[in-house]
Amino acid sequence: IYVPFVLDSFFLPTERMVRPDPGNVAVVSQSGGILVDNMVKFKEEGVGLSLGVSIGNKALIREIDLLRYLQEDPSTRVIVFYIEGFEEGEGRDFALAGSDSKKPVVVIKSGKTTAGTRAVLSHTASLAGDYQIFSTAMAQMGIVEAQNELELISFCESLSSYQTPIEATVGIISGSGGHGAMAVDVCSAHGFHVPRLNAEQQELIRKDLSESIRNIASLENPIDLTGSAVDEDFVCAARHISTIAEIGCVILLLLPYLPGITSDLGARLSNIYQEVGKPLIAYVPHVEKFRMLIEGFELNGVPVSHSIEAAVLMAEALKRRKSS
Amino acid sequence: IYVPFVLDSFFLPTERMVRPDPGNVAVVSQSGGILVDNMVKFKEEGVGLSLGVSIGNKALIREIDLLRYLQEDPSTRVIVFYIEGFEEGEGRDFALAGSDSKKPVVVIKSGKTTAGTRAVLSHTASLAGDYQIFSTAMAQMGIVEAQNELELISFCESLSSYQTPIEATVGIISGSGGHGAMAVDVCSAHGFHVPRLNAEQQELIRKDLSESIRNIASLENPIDLTGSAVDEDFVCAARHISTIAEIGCVILLLLPYLPGITSDLGARLSNIYQEVGKPLIAYVPHVEKFRMLIEGFELNGVPVSHSIEAAVLMAEALKRRKSS
C-alpha cells in the first residue's frame, strides 16, 4: 500500500523508488511490480496518485472491495486496476459494480493469450479467463480498457483532468505542418473527425493573427500556424477554436523549438480552458528545459502528452466516457 | 541539414534544441518540425544520429537521392524517411531502390487518411497517394514501415544495434511476474512465439540459481526470477536462454527497484550478447538514477526500451528484417 505522504508499506529500498506526487488517481494492482513501475511512469508524466495498492493473489482483499471503497474516497477521481484474472462470478460482480461507478474506471489486463494465460497462472495462480469476453464486458459496462501501458498512462492523465464526456471531433493547432498531418492520421485511426473549418471560421482566426503569419498560416483544421508563430497566435487560434460548438476537444502540438514562443505559453493557453471549459490536450516533448512550459499546463489542469499518439489517446479516454 | 559536430544549418535557436549524440541512424524528413522532434526523442532514447536532413517540398533533392547517397555513407547503418507524398513514379523508384538496400530502411508516412491527405496537401503540397498501396509496397520491398512515433524510435534503436534477421521466437526474463505476463501478451499480439522451456532446459538454469530463489523462480518462459533475484541470477538465466537455438532474441525486463540487483548488471548482461551473439533487448524505466544500468547496456550495443511495448517493437524490427 502506498498513500503519498501518509503510508508506504513497500518492502523495496527507498532510494531505488520513484514516487508520484499526491493526486487523484488510485491504482489497484494484482502485481506489485506493475504497481511500482506505474508509479515511475506517473511521476514522469506528472500524474498524481491518491493511493496505490498491490492485492497480489487476493488472499485478503479483492478488486470489488477497493472499487467500493474508492467510490467514497474524496481524494480519488480515477480508479485503475491491473487485472490478471477473476474467480468464478467475481468478474461479473466487478463489471456490474464498475458500470455503476460515478468515477471513471480504467482497467488493463494480462493473460490475453494462451501463452499469457500460462504466465498469469504461474504468477498469481489466477484464472485469466476468456479475454474476448472480458474485453467485451468491460466495454459494455462503460469501463475504459487500456490495451497497453501507453494507453493506461494516457487515459489516467486525461481522466485525472477531465471527467465530462466529449463528442468525437477534434481541433488541432500546430506550429509544424508535419505534426498536424500526423495528428490527423492518428485521430482518424481512433475514429475522431477533424472537421474542416469553414471560410467564416477561418476568417475570424486570420484577422487576429500576427501580420507575419497571416498569409502563410493554414487554418482549415489542422491549423498550422507555421514556425514563425508567436504566443499570441497560439492563444488566438486556441481561443477561437475552443468556442466552436462542434469541436469536442482541442489538441495543441507545441514545439518549444519555435523562436517566437515563450515558456509562458502553457499557462496562458490553460487560461482559455479555464474560461471556455473546452478540454485542451497539449503535446510538448518531455525535456527538462521545457519544464516551465509543461508545468504551465499541468499545474493549471491541462494534461501534457509526450507524443502525438499519447495526445490522441488522451482524447480517446474522454470519448470513451461518452458510452458509459 | 544536421551532421553531429560537423554541420548544423537549422535556423532554430540553439538553446532551444536538443541534439542526439553521433551515431549510425540517418533521418531524412519532408518536415523540418518532425525531424527536430525526432532528434529530441533520439537523444532521450540514447539513439545516435549520423545525419539529419529536411528535404521539405523536394525542390532540390528527393528521398531516392539520399537513399543512394546513404548506401555509401560509412557512418550510416539505418536509413529513416518521414514521407508525406510522392510525385508520379517517384514512389515506385523509391520502393525499388529500398528493396536493393543492404542497410535497413525505415519509413513513416503521414497522409494516410482523407483528412490527413488534406493536411499534407496544405503542408508540402505533396500528393499523399493511396496509403494502402504505399504500405503494401513497402512491406513487399522489405522496407520497415513504422505506424507511429513509438514504432519509429523503437525500430531505429533496435536496428541501430542489430542488423541480422531473427526468427519470431522470444525468451523473456523478468523479476516481476506481472511484467512477464504483460510481455507475453504483447509478444503474442506481434506474432512472436514464447516457447515453453522443457524440463531439461529449466533444470540447467535452476541448478545455477541462488538458493533463495531456486524453488520459487518460474522458469517455463517467461522466466520470473522473483523480486529476490540477484545479479548472478539474471546473468545465469540470460546466458542459458541465449544459447537455446530456437530462441530468436531475449527480452530482459529489468526493474531497478529490486534490492538484489546492482547498476553493474547492464554491462554484465551485455557481455553475454558479445559472447553468444544472440540479440538482447532490455527494458529499464528511463529515470536518471537508473542511468548507469541503462548505459551499461547501451554503451555495449544493447538497446534499452522505456516500456514493455517498446521492447517488443524492438524485436519486431528484427523479425521484419527477415522478410527482406
Image (cartoon, coloured by chain):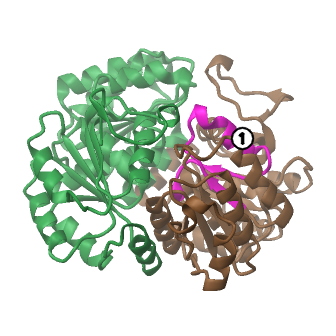
Chain colours: A brown, B green
Disc 1 element: helix
Locate residue A317: give its quadrant: bottom right
The residue that appears at 83% across and 66% down in the rendered structure is: A276
Report the chain holding disc 1.
A
Decide whether residue A296 is among the magenta residues: yes
Up-down relation of residue B162 to residue B141 (above or below): above
From the viewer's side, name the closer residue of B2 and B238.
Answer: B2
Residue annotated with mark 1: A295
Q: Residue at horizontal 71%, vertical 81%?
A: A246
**Residue B137 location, x and y as percent?**
19, 71
Q: Position of residue A57 (x, y in %)?
A: 66, 44
Crowdedness near tag 1: few (<14), some (14–19) or many (≥20) residues, C-alpha within 10 Å: some
Q: B55 and B109: which one is in front?
A: B55
Q: Quadrant of residue B52?
A: top left
Residue A46 point in image, percent of width and height: 69, 41
Q: Residue at x 51, y 42 (%)?
A: B179
* Residue A20 quadrant: top right
Q: Is residue B282 left or right of residue B91?
A: right
Please give the range of residues in magenta: A280-309
Q: Is A233 one of the magenta-colored residues?
A: no
Q: Amino acid at mark 1?
A: Glu
Q: Quadrant of the N terminus of chain B?
A: top left
Q: Position of residue A210 (x, y in %)?
A: 63, 60
Residue A85 visible in the snapshot: no
Where is the C terminus of chain B found, in terms of image quarters? Answer: bottom left
Q: Is residue A85 left or right of residue A98?
A: left
Q: Please state which of residues B255 and B90 is positioned toward the viewer in this rendering.
A: B90
Relative side of A309 to B129, left or right:
right
Q: Residue at x 60, y 62 (%)?
A: A211
Give the mark count.
Answer: 1
Can the viewer see residue B165 in this picture? yes
